[in-house]
Amino acid sequence: MEDLDFKAIGMKIKERRKMQGITQEAVASLLGVNPSHISNIECGRANPSLTALVKIANILECSVDFFISGEYTYKPGKGREETLDDKIMDKLKYCDINKKARVLKMIDLL
């Protein structure tokens, strides 16, 4: 396996942070680090630990998968068809929290 593409991961962190309207300073404060460290992570100059990545995902209200999904190399084989649950989860993966809340309300109505 090749190393993770931390530059791509950092770009996704930045994208999600901006989507949520959160500053680097706010993320750094909640994470207990210097804001320059968040900048370095977002630019790919520093690699976050798994613990830091989980904390960042929690702060930005998403799953770690949002940041690392491009790193997966596994694809279902010919003998396995993608399930409906897989398809639904794939669609929801990149939705913001408001869209996910609306989908949940629709599901509750069913």
Image (spheres, helix red, strand yellow):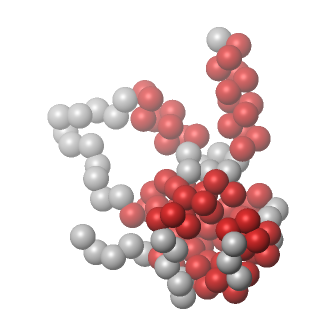
Q: Position of residue 35 (x, y in %)?
A: 73, 81
- Position of the C terminus by quadrant: top right
Q: Position of residue 61 (x, y in %)?
A: 68, 51
> How many numbered marks does the figure carry?
0
Q: Is 87 located above or below residue 48 in the figure?
A: above
Q: Residue at x 29, y 49 (%)?
A: 75
Q: Residue at x 76, y 41 (%)?
A: 98
Q: Is 110 located above or below residue 83 in the figure?
A: above
Identify which residue, 59 or 18, lies in the foreground: 59
- Position of the N terminus by quadrant: bottom left
Identify which residue, 63 or 105, lies in the foreground: 63
Does residue 8 appear in the picture of this structure? no
Q: Residue at x 59, y 73 (%)?
A: 11
| Horizontal relation, residue 80 to residue 9: left or right | left
Kindly indicate the quadrant of the structure image that contains residue 100: top right
Kindly indicate the quadrant of the structure image that contains residue 31: bottom right
Q: Residue furthest front?
A: 32
Identify which residue, 88 or 26, lies in the foreground: 26
Q: Is 12 located above or below residue 45 in the figure?
A: above
Q: Position of residue 26 (x, y in %)?
A: 79, 69
